[in-house]
Amino acid sequence: MEGKRLREQSDTRLVSFIGKTGSGKSATGNTILEKKEFLSKASGSSITEHCQLAENRIAGHRLLVIDTPGLFDTELTNGEITREIIRCIHMSTPGPHAFLLVLRLDPFTQEEIDTFSRLYDLFGEQMSSYAIIVFT
């Protein structure tokens, strides 16, 4: 699917879920879409290995959700994860309306700080203009 076509309709909203492995990205995507589109289960290991796109019509708007592999994935290298997330963002050219940064409501650790740093390195300071933090 060509990215430009994803956003060309004025009633379309595109969001991308980003976070650590096991943070609940897929489950949050299912909740927001109001239907089960992404495989989701409680696990400390990776479930989502590749970007997945799902959509639903909610309140008169076409909602597109991109689920991404988890940062600090248990199965993939950091380089593989970074390449896949970049591919996800290219799916949504010129970019999503919002990044939903999904965090577990646990004590904030160095790994969460590293997550923010990696996202900042990947997307630059403009990311903060499009980021929404979701606690699970």
Image (cartoon, rainbow, N blue to C red):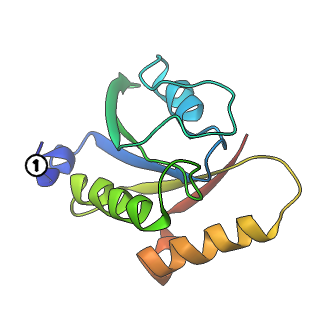
Please state, as top left, top right, bottom left or bottom right, where the C terminus lies in the image. Answer: top right
Is 122 above or below relative to 15? below
Left or right: residue 110 versus residue 119 is right
**96 and 26: which one is in front?**
26
Q: Residue at x 51, y 26 (%)?
A: 30
The residue carrying mark 1 is 2
Q: Position of residue 131 (x, y in %)?
A: 54, 62
Three-letter code for the amino acid on which mark 1 is drawn: Glu
**View extreme (top): residue:** 35
The answer to whether residue 71 is seen in the rendering is yes
**124 and 111: which one is in front?**
111
Image quarter for residue 90? bottom left
Is 69 above or below relative to 112? above
Left or right: residue 22 versus residue 119 is right
Q: Secondary structure at mark 1?
A: loop
The answer to whether residue 60 is seen in the rendering is no
Q: Residue at x 47, y 17 (%)?
A: 36
Q: Residue at x 55, y 57 (%)?
A: 71
**43 and 51: which one is in front?**
43
Left or right: residue 61 versus residue 45 is left
Disc 1 crowd rating (10 Å Cα; few below 14, some 14-19, many 20+) is few
Left or right: residue 105 versus residue 50 is right
Q: Position of residue 123 (x, y in %)?
A: 42, 75
**View extreme (right): residue:** 107
Please state, as top left, top right, bottom left or bottom right, where the N terminus lies in the image. Answer: top left
Is 18 above or below relative to 56? below
Q: Residue at x 48, y 56 (%)?
A: 99
Q: Position of residue 62 (x, y in %)?
A: 30, 32
Q: Position of residue 15 (x, y in %)?
A: 41, 47
Label count reads 1
